[in-house]
Image (spheres, rainbow, N blue to C red):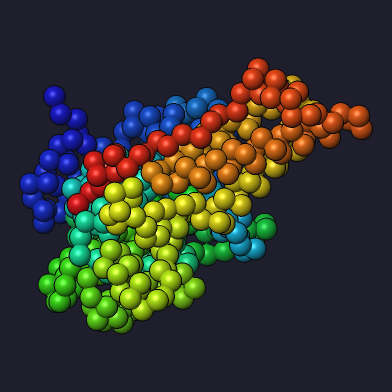
Amino acid sequence: MQTGLERIAEKARKETKLVFTSLTHHLTKELIWESLCHIPNGSAPGVDGQSVDNAKENFGNWSEEMLTAVHRCGYKAPAIRRVYIPKPGKAEKRPIGIPPIADRALQRSASRVLSAIYEEDFLKCSFGGRPGIGAHNALCTFNEVVAGKKVSWVLECDLKNFFGSLDHEWLLRFVKHRVGDPRIICLIRRWLKAGILEDGCLRESTEGTPQGGSISVLLSNIYLHYVLDLWFERVVKPRMGGEIYLIRYLDDFVVCFQFRADAVRFREVLEKRLQKFSLRLEPTKTKLVEFGRFATRHTKERGKRMETVSFLGFTHFCTINQKGNFMVGRKTEKSRQRRCIGNLSKIMQIDRHKTLGEQAKGINQILRGYYAYYGMGGNIMSLHRIYRFAERYWRKMLSSRSQRGNIIWETFHKIKKSFPLRCPRVYIPFARMQSLAVL
């Protein structure tokens, strides 16, 4: 038996131009409760100060009132609490919006309903914020495109303040291509217009969508689906002289070209296209790089050094495998590696007077996360570099616990045998990359 969301997905798949005029009844108490249970218990509260545990205890009270308001188009989205988190390798900080827990559950529920439609519409080139598809799929796709297609040039692109620049009117127009339910449109408009609370002052929101809400990721994908993805497939591709490929993860994307002339021409029209929708490229993160197996030959003939491509936390470079054939190599970006080292240093300094088991647990938690993301074929040296740092710094912290506490390596290895650190592991070897690529 099909669920309501599965029926929506099937309809969206069969009727690509259908406008859904009745969706709000899919926002049920059961779906909101399920969404609430997906929010981690330690999540930061919003402006109302309500924790996840409190929201669960009082669920019966606020959920009924919330759904009634949504069905009457009377739901007032609460203000977003703004906080700032550090950007890796930069002095500036990234603004994050924290909605109240109850509103977050409603956002997640609405996002699931809308995703049932848009997952049928989104193109293969889009990877970020989608169920079952993530950064590793984008990275593997980039690997297969460069290694197996006619690619000689890569355009690295990053949008400047993307989440803060979305035009509300354009976004609502895009949503209305598939959603005709006035209650859902009203709900999205209220979320977009919700004020931002910062340093005790409430500021009106006239553009953009705050990073942090579940609905923000979906709305940003819808925006770029119409602004970039469809335009690229239907307008740009047929007009190019050679092969061209787009790989996008939210606002971070690369475009691979066969010919330089196509790349230069595309960049010019891309800037005009983005400007029409209130978006701009980040100049410091946008560059055209000669890259690929054909580029390798050309640079060798000219006696030049090959350039690298930065994409999703990795520095990609051209190299050869053991058989002497071209392959794409990768290593962790320096800024990401410094961030991991900083996290390890911080937790070891804080935990150095705890038991050895507790210290090892905290270190392994960071190592596990690092290996899980950066453990891709060709990057084993970066994993070992982090592991060796963790070893050396842990010994240093243990030695600093007292004035006569210097621990020699022999003693440290005995400690490590009883409380082992997680060893480097490649989770996605070269053999798996082809199966994870989406072409």
Foreground of the two, 79 or 150: 150
The residue that appears at 49% across and 73% down in the rendered structure is 284
Foreground of the two, 424 or 235: 424
The residue that appears at 50% across and 45% down in the rendered structure is 381
Q: Where is the N terminus found, in terms of image quarters?
A: top left
Foreground of the two, 304 or 15: 304
Residue 146 rendering spot, x and y as whole percentages: 27, 59
Residue 340 rendering spot, x and y as whole percentages: 59, 46
Residue 102 rendering spot, x and y as whole percentages: 47, 38
Q: Quadrant of residue 335?
A: bottom right
- Furthest residue to the top? 418
Q: How many marks?
A: 0
Residue 263 visible (yes or no): yes
In this picture, residue 311 sits left or right of residue 130: right
- Furthest residue to the left? 14
The residue that appears at 47% across and 42% down in the rendered structure is 380
Foreground of the two, 99 or 377: 377
Q: Quadrant of residue 258?
A: bottom left
Residue 424 rendering spot, x and y as whole percentages: 51, 35
In this picture, residue 52 sits left or right of residue 153: right
Residue 277 visible (yes or no): no
The residue that appears at 23% across and 75% down in the rendered structure is 259
